[in-house]
Amino acid sequence: MRLSLQGVEVGYPAPSGAYLPALGPISFDVADDEFVCLVGPSGCGKSTLIRVLAGLLPPTAGTAYCGDELINRPLPQTAIMFQDTNLMPWRTVLDNIALPLEIVGATKTERFRIVRELLPQLNLEGFEFAYPAELSGGMAQRVALGRVILQQPRIWLLDEPFGALDALTREKLSLELLRLRGRSQQTIVLVTHDISEAVLLADRIIVISRRPGTLAADIDIDLPRPRSADMIYQPGFLRLAKQVRACIEDLRD
Ligand SMILES: Nc1ncnc2c1ncn2[C@@H]1O[C@H](COP(=O)(O)OP(=O)(O)O)[C@@H](O)[C@H]1O
Ligand SMILES: [Mg+2]
């Protein structure tokens, strides 16, 4: 499904009562099935933008669309994932992943069967009865990813989902994300501060300027798919990473 931002602006109320602009005006489209990475300095409005696309935050001005539908509330075809996994500590891995199934009324037996089929893909086999406190950061993110997958969303909004993980775990999980995305293509918008991660994953990278964030650059990542970890040493990859980096550096004051 296509996403479209048209002149979107967001301001937050300041303690003085004035409105502090945080984002925009910004306009761009994400095509159906496209994987877009958002990069930009911290505080430039990336999370704000994700919250607008998720229907969690109404823009101060402008409009956001998902297909032909105005985004003015969370839409059922959209799933969102943050750096904080928000796993429920009192629920096992199985029950955390199964949450979307529970919401639609699947029975316990059905939930158990569906989640168990998914666990090998998530590399979580044998951990179905573990609790979040017993998991590594990477495993917790895979649980959160499992929950997103079971929702079968057409739109994935991912706000620095792997931001708190070490570099190698992050790279591994990014590639798993591509693999899990698989054949049934989804539209994905992923925020990351990691330039290599952005180039490795994206069809397109959007660079956002300093606050209030506007569109600073829109870079096509024309690398072949499937992508693999060893691509990061190839000249084509390095050229693109350098280009993105230069755009971000241009934004610094
Ligand atoms: N709830 C809020 N109230 C007031 N200001 C906010 C709020 N959320 C974010 N901001 C401000 O808006 C700007 C953009 O924030 P954010 O979207 O979180 O940026 P990013 O995700 O790119 O780091 C920041 O300067 C931040 O301090
Ligand atoms: Mg953020």
Image (tube, rainbow, N blue to C red):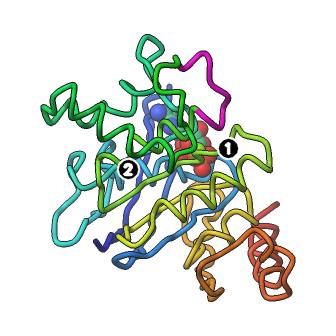
User: In which quadrant will I find the C terminus?
Assistant: bottom right
Quadrant of the rendered image containing residue 239:
bottom right
Q: How far across and down, in percent of the image, does residue 53 sit?
A: 35, 55
Q: Secondary structure at mark 2?
A: helix
239 sits left or right of 178 in the view: right
- Whether the residue under disc 1 has CB within 8 Å of ligand 2: no
Looking at the rendered image, the disc whose residue lies closer to the viewer, 2 or 1, is 2
| Residue 137 covered by magenta stretch | yes
The kind of residue tagged 1 is Gly
User: In which quadrant will I find the N terminus?
Assistant: bottom left
Instruction: Point out the tag, 2 or 1, that comes first from the N-terminus.
Output: 2
Q: How far across and down, in percent of the image, does residue 156 sit?
A: 40, 56
- How would you rate the neighbour count of disc 2 (Cα within 10 Å): few for under 14, some for 14-19, many for 20 or more? some
At 80% from the left edge and 62% from the top edge, which residue is drawn? 252
Give the total number of marks visible in the rendering.
Answer: 2
User: Who is closer to the viewer here, 159 or 213?
Assistant: 159
Task: Characterize the magenta stretch by its predominant secondary structure.
Answer: helix
At 44% from the left edge and 76% from the top edge, which residue is drawn? 34
CA gap, disc 2 to disc 1?
20 Å
141 sits left or right of 2 in the view: right
Q: Which residue is mark 1?
A: 163
Which range is magenta?
132-139
Q: Reply above or below: 139 against 191.
A: above
User: Who is closer to the viewer here, 141 or 127?
Assistant: 127
Q: Reply above or below: 49 against 138.
A: below
Q: Which residue is mark 2?
A: 149
Q: Are marks 2 and 1 in contact (CB under 8 Å)?
A: no
Figure quadrant, ligand 1? top right
The kind of residue tagged 2 is Ile
Q: Secondary structure at mark 1?
A: loop
Q: How far across and down, in percent of the image, does residue 45 sit?
A: 54, 51
